Amino acid sequence: MRDDTWLEQRFDQIWTLFFPDVEKKNVSIRWKGKWKNKFGHITTTKDKKSEIVINKLFKDLQVPEDVIKLTIAHEIVHYSHGFHSHLPRLHKHPHKGGVVEKDLKKRGFSYMLKKEKEWQKKEWFNLFKELMPHKVQPRTRIIKQRKPFSFFRL
């Protein structure tokens, strides 16, 4: 299992290696939530600090480390674009026009982006079912009842 220290070390490594141009001020990272459709997010805390949150299910060693690194980098890009940080906001919307993906590619994450998309498509939902079986509901087929068809109007 990956712990808080492991996450903080990866966070510092990624920031130092890939985001040396971005001022790091009052930002922290932690594990939180067990989401099916969200890998992480960035928010502002009550005391006006930036907080990056990574899906707690990613502590499991079955989740590739590259997926976690890319999730951290993705949230740092939001921070660098002025979302939930002290920096000026560069865009009106955080994902408009693929700005996050473009920035990640510019910083050398192209390989990880491709790998993450494949992993998410092929493995993530099965792993989620394994880790969170009580959250997965069996699909039920809903059959609509139709009104009887008539050529005659009453």
Image (spheres, rainbow, N blue to C red):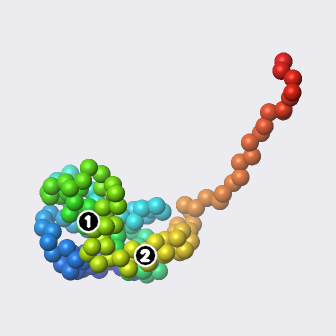
Task: Identify the disc placed on residue 114.
Answer: 2
Query: In this orientation, does residue 108 appear?
Result: yes
* Residue 40 percent coordinates (x, y): 36, 64
**Is residue 112 depicted above or below 55 in this figure?**
below
Residue plotted at (40% across, 66% down) = 39
Marks 1 and 2, how far apart at CA: 17 Å
Task: Identify the disc placed on residue 77.
Answer: 1
Task: Identify the disc placed on residue 42.
Answer: none
Front-most of residues 46 and 146:
146
* Residue 100 percent coordinates (x, y): 31, 64
Going by the numbered disc 2, the residue's amino acid type is Lys
The image quadrant where one finds the C terminus is top right
Q: Earlier in the sequence, mark 1 or mark 2?
A: 1
Query: In this orientation, does residue 5 appear?
Result: no
SS assignment at label 1: helix
SS assignment at label 2: helix
Q: Seen in the image, is 22 located left or right of residue 151?
A: left
Q: How many numbered discs sit on the rendered protein?
A: 2
Residue plotted at (30% across, 71% down) = 104
> Which residue appears farthest toward the top when viewing the image?
154
Front-most of residues 8 and 108:
108
Residue plotted at (49% across, 75% down) = 118
Mark 2 packing: few (<14 Cα in 10 Å), some, or many (20+)?
A: few
Front-most of residues 143 and 134:
143
Q: Seen in the image, is 43 located left or right of residue 142?
A: left
* Residue 126 percent coordinates (x, y): 56, 71
Residue plotted at (46% across, 61% down) = 37
The image quadrant where one finds the N terminus is bottom left
Going by the numbered disc 1, the residue's amino acid type is Val
**Residue 129 sits in quarter:** bottom right
**Residue 19 sits in quarter:** bottom left
* Residue 143 percent coordinates (x, y): 74, 46
